[in-house]
Image (spheres, helix red, strand yellow):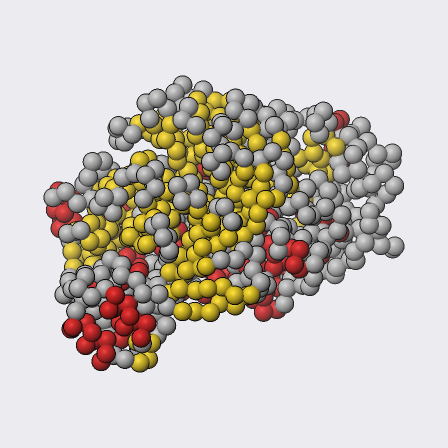
């Protein structure tokens, strides 16, 4: 869904004689009208109809390197994240340029695919914490490597080639011996939060630290209120944001604003300055590492760091001359107040790191048409903007780079000499991955939200085609996503969206001061203090100046209203005004748009908490504490004026109440927030550390570095001395192990058979978890050259053929005979997707036998729509007849009775089914 319709599409049909895979039905389109890039567009449609929504669970995992071409240029491979597969295409020198060659089941939420050579793929499964190693010749998984939590990318480097894998949640790179995959990896710890994207020149491996930040931090309210630390005359809190006072001016008659912390940012000279340029050095006793990219010697594993990149380096590319090119976003969170940030709080930038350097040689804005002196530009100018860049590749001559805009659904070309814009092309919605096919001078983009691949001519920078693969995403998600990501639809300059801060619906790990001096008091309309008598305390009204607040996740919002740290938004609909007030859009979101937005947001699940045991139980030792003891203290300990659980109710840790400032011993009242993502907020170690990975930690403003520090606040009643400190560590360990609502085992995999198997012990553990009802077990195996699916139920495996079942012993026999059987635990309610991929009620094996399409709900063994082979228009007509006749005598598309040859019997079937199909 795009914000502006620039043209129309006139459909016509193409005759195509492809392989005997009914997933290759095609539609051919030419584009008419005004478009940002022109040219022939051929759209291959396998099926985009979504399955029953109750069988769909997704985590909105971020793509990192989701598109790859094999070194010989013969295959293009794309991750199909929501379908837990990779899609393999033959690369053609002629239109339609790509031909679907097959689909391979991998782990849960694949986000990266890399070719180790032209016959082997490595697929990184973000939620499964695994890598699927694929043999392209047999189109099957031959090994499963178990990695650390939330792997993101993999590259191959070194004189003795090894695989380097980013385990993002653990802040490390795992190095695997390709000759011995059973060996434990060597660990390279990264001094930074969330390493993701990788590139290599063969000798060095570069790892982008996704949450590297921008050298900003927050000064605690107590220090801002201390005369010796506050640089302003009279020690005001809050201080003004300009030399001449507040801008915009304060509304006359406002009561005194609550005291608050202060966001400062380190300048080139090392001074910590606020938005007015005033130094707060006296108040800052800590420092930040400033590491943006880790540089690992692929042979010795010695690690250094590069600095000077943007706030969030999202993608890396290696140029032929040894330079590293990064694209990402730059946050301006040091600027105070929403009116001053309106529409221009985020920049889209590129940066270049020269070979051997540890500081970027240059950085540039990828939206040169925006001067940021205004918050809103005409709609057609917004279409020139790129937003949320997620992929980058460098031209063969290293003079230019191409970047995809996830939020702007376009592709830009820019000069590496001065970042000048060289070209702009519209592609499918939500492009992430990008590949340059230098041999054919073409660019491919993986369009995540469209479920397609766009083909762009490199020389003319015009679209040649778009190939769609099966995407089971429900339509309510498709319709709601643009309000989070679409920068051109939702912002005044075309480069910003809600996802600029709520990255992938999560957090940018920064604090922002979005108050408004010119605003009004909002009257309290929420429950206060759990119904305790007023003499205990009152919550008060909401002041328009609120101080710094860290970005909160949008995951898990269902049932945890009211929203915001202060609880000043009763419903999700109340965020509608942010479209105009913060994003700079022409108007607020409508009620219908907010309904779609909320439905999408509420569909996103938290991933499993990696700090729990695989069976979901708490560990007895973690992070210096005992989470089991911590849970007991949380539920029954008198650690405050009530137990923790009284306010932070289980299972989310949230509460609908506001807690008054006096009970919190804070300057203002706060809502009880959920606790399911505490493990994502570590990295700010201490107010005395000089190597903090980030400048914001816990509590509403991020001013508390660790949970241990939080539990040392005066409102808590832990035991005295060392015993109390241990209690604090125990409760902190529990908080870091908080149940996310997704069982800890979801995504877990085990492989039996093949060159490298995880063994029966691991597999049996998965079976036990399935027997306990915590998750559901599925399996996939290549049998007789066909990928088969299995779902474990009541001690046996249902198969993708209705009349057939399988046993665990039977699958072990397949593994012993040479097949590789991969087991995966999936969320409850989703296991039947292993048997019926398109959720149309007919199992995949039965559909193959009946020559219907397992990825088209309209094509079933009982529907004549399975004969609609030319383009899924729900008519059997001349276009289908032409497709059949073009394949006469072959075994390809048009073999309607599956006898191996397209002939007279197939012609008779088609003619007897002529007209509308059903």
Residue 393 seen in the figure: yes
Relative to residue 236, is residue 347 drawn left or right?
left
Residue shown at the point (60%, 54%) measured from the top left? 487
Residue 661 seen in the figure: no
From this view, report whether residue 274 is shown above or below residue 18: above
Q: Position of residue 405 (x, y in %)?
A: 54, 49
The number of discs equals 0
Which of the 4 image quarters holds residue 141? top left
From this view, report whether residue 610 is shown above or below residue 499: above
Residue shown at the point (39%, 20%) measured from the top left? 299
Q: Position of residue 582 (x, y in %)?
A: 69, 54
Which of the 4 image quarters holds residue 116? top left
Relative to residue 402, is residue 581 drawn left or right?
right
From this view, report whether residue 530 is shown above or below residue 240: below
Q: Position of residue 470 (x, y in %)?
A: 36, 59
Residue shown at the point (56%, 23%) measured from the top left? 358
Question: Closest to the observer: 164 or 527?
Answer: 164
Question: Closest to the observer: 317 or 779?
Answer: 317
Residue shown at the point (79%, 58%) measured from the top left? 520
Question: Closest to the observer: 483 or 14?
Answer: 14
Q: Position of residue 223 (x, y in %)?
A: 74, 33
From this view, report whether residue 811 is shown above or below residue 320: below
Please state, as top left, top right, bottom left or bottom right, where the C terminus lies in the image: bottom left
């Amino acid at each position: 869904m795009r914000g502006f319709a620039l043209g129309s599409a006139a459909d016509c049909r193409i005759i195509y004689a492809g392989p005997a895979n009914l997933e290759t039905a095609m539609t051919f389109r030419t584009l008419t009208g005004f478009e940002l890039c022109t040219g022939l567009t051929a759209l291959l449609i396998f099926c985009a109809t979504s399955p029953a929504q109750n069988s769909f669970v997704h985590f909105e995992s971020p793509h990192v390197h989701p598109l790859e071409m094999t070194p010989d240029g013969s295959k293009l491979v794309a991750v199909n994240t929501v379908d837990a597969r990779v899609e393999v295409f033959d690369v053609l020198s002629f239109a339609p340029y790509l031909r679907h060659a097959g689909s391979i089941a991998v782990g849960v939420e694949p986000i990266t695919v890399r070719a180790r050579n032209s016959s082997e793929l490595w697929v990184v499964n973000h939620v499964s914490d695994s890598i699927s190693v694929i043999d392209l010749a047999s189109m099957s998984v031959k090994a499963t490597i178990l990695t650390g939590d939330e792997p993101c990318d993999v590259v191959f480097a070194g004189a003795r080639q090894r695989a380097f894998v980013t385990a993002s949640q653990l802040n490390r790179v795992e190095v695997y011996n390709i000759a011995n995959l059973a060996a434990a990896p060597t660990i390279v710890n990264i001094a930074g939060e969330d390493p993701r994207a990788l590139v290599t020149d063969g000798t060095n491996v570069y790892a982008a630290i996704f949450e590297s930040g921008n050298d900003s931090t927050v000064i605690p309210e107590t220090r801002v209120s201390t005369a010796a630390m506050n640089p302003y005359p009279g020690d005001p809190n809050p201080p003004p944001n300009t030399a001449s006072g507040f801008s915009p001016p304060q509304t006359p008659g406002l009561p005194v604003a609550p005291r608050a912390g202060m966001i400062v940012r380190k300048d080139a000279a090392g001074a910590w300055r606020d938005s007015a340029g005033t130094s707060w050095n006296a108040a800052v006793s800590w420092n930040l590492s400033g590491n943006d990219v880790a540089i690992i010697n692929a042979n010795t594993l010695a690690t250094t760091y590069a600095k000077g990149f943007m706030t969030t380096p999202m993608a890396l590319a290696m140029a032929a001359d040894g330079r590293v090119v990064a694209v990402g976003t730059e946050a301006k969170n040091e600027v105070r107040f929403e009116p001053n940030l309106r529409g221009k709080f985020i920049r889209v930038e590129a940066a270049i790191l020269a070979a051997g350097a540890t500081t970027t040689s240059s950085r540039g804005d990828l939206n040169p048409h925006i001067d940021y002196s205004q918050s809103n530009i005409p709609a057609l100018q917004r279409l020139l903007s790129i937003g949320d860049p997620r992929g980058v590749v460098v031209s063969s001559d290293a003079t230019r780079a191409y970047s995809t805009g996830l939020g702007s659904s376009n592709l830009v070309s820019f000069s590496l000499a001065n970042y000048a814009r060289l070209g702009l092309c519209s592609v499918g919605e939500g492009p992430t991955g990008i590949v340059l096919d230098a041999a054919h001078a073409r660019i491919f983009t993986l369009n995540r939200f469209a479920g397609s691949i766009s083909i762009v001519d490199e020389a003319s920078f015009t679209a040649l085609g778009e190939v769609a693969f099966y995407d089971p995403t429900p339509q309510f998600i498709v319709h709601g996503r643009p309000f989070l990501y679409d920068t051109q639809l939702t912002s005044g300059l075309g480069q910003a969206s809600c996802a600029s801060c709520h990255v992938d619906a999560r957090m940018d790990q920064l604090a922002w001061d979005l108050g408004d001096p010119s605003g009004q008091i909002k009257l309290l309309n929420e429950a206060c203090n759990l119904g305790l008598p007023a003499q205990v305390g009152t919550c008060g009204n909401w002041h328009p100046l609120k101080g710094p607040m860290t970005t909160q996740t949008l995951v898990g919002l269902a049932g945890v209203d009211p929203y915001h740290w202060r609880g000043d938004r009763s419903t999700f609909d109340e965020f509608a005004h942010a479209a105009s007030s913060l994003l700079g859009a022409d108007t607020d979101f409508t009620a219908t748009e907010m309904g779609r937005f909320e439905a999408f947001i509420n569909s996103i699940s938290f991933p499993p908490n990696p700090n729990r045991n695989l069976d979901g139980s708490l560990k007895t030792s973690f992070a210096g504490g005992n989470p089991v003891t911590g849970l007991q203290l949380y539920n029954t300990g008198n650690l405050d004026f009530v137990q923790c659980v009284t306010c932070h109710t289980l299972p989310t840790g949230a509460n609908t109440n506001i807690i008054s400032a006096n009970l919190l011993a804070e300057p203002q009242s706060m809502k009880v927030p959920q606790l399911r993502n505490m493990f994502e907020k570590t990295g700010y170690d201490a107010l005395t550390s000089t190597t903090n990975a980030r400048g914001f930690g816990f509590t509403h403003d991020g001013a508390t570095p660790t949970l241990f520090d939080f539990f040392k606040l005066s409102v808590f009643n832990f035991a005295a001395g060392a015993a109390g400190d241990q209690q604090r560590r125990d409760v902190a360990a529990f908080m870091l192990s908080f149940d996310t609502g997704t069982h800890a085992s979801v995504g877990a995999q085990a492989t039996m058979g093949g060159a490298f198997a995880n063994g029966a012990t691991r597999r049996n553990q998965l079976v036990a978890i399935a027997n306990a009802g915590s998750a559901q077990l599925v399996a996939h195996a290549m049998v007789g050259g066909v990928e088969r699916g299995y779902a474990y139920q009541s001690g046996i495996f249902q198969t993708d053929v209705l009349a057939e079942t399988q046993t665990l012993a039977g699958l072990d026999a397949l593994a012993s005979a040479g097949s590789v059987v991969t087991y995966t635990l999936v969320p409850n309610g989703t296991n039947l997707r292993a048997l019926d991929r398109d959720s149309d009620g007919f199992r995949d094996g039965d559909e193959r036998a009946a020559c219907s399409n397992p990825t088209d709900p309209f094509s079933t063994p009982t529907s004549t729509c399975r004969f609609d082979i030319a383009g899924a228009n729900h008519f059997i007509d001349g276009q289908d007849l032409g497709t059949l006749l073009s394949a006469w005598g072959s075994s390809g598309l048009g073999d309607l009775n599956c006898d191996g040859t397209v002939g007279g019997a197939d012609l008779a079937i088609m003619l007897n089914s002529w007209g509308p199909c059903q």
